[in-house]
């Protein structure tokens, strides 16, 4: 194969052979890169569910977080109201 490419390049037909081989290889390489990026993106989205909307705390945990200064009084009251509304 290499010998035929070298022989063809010496006769001037090498450019045609080279182009006929190079273009499909470049297209294939571009397709592989695109597929790899697509698969990586899909895997990342499937493995990272993002922030959970259903995180719930017990009333005791809310009181502890307020006592530790992690929640302001307003945040505590809002969470308390949500928690008591869900339980009724």
Image: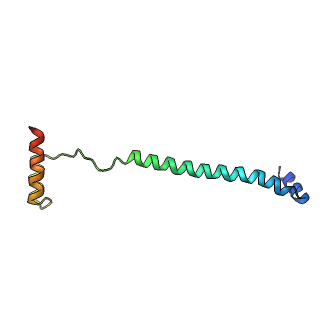
- Residue 41 horizontal/vertical position (percent): 46, 50
In the rendered structure, the answer to whether residue 47 lies left or right of residue 13 reads: left
Q: Residue furthest right?
A: 11
Residue displayed at 18% across by 45% down = 56
Residue reaching furthest to the top: 88
Number of labels in the image equals 0
Instruction: Give how far across and how far down residue 23 sits, in percent.
Output: 72, 53
**In the image, residue 54 lies at what x, y percent?**
23, 44
User: Left or right: 49 with respect to 5?
Assistant: left
Using residue 40 as the reference point, say whether residue 50 is left or right of it.
left
Give the image location of residue 65, x and y in percent.
Answer: 13, 56
- The image's colour scheme reads rainbow
Please name the residue shown 12% across and 45% down the image: 83
Quarter containing the C terminus: top left
Residue drawn 77% across the image and 51% down it: 20
């Amino acid at each position: 194969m290499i010998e035929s490419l070298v022989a063809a390049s010496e006769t001037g037909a090498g450019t045609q052979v080279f182009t006929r081989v190079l273009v499909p290889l470049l297209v294939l390489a571009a397709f592989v890169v695109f597929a790899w990026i697509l698969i990586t993106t899909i895997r990342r989205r499937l493995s990272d569910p993002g922030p959970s909307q259903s995180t719930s705390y017990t009333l005791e945990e809310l009181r502890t977080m307020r006592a530790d200064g992690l929640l302001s009084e307003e945040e505590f009251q809002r969470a308390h109201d949500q928690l008591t509304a869900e339980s009724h």
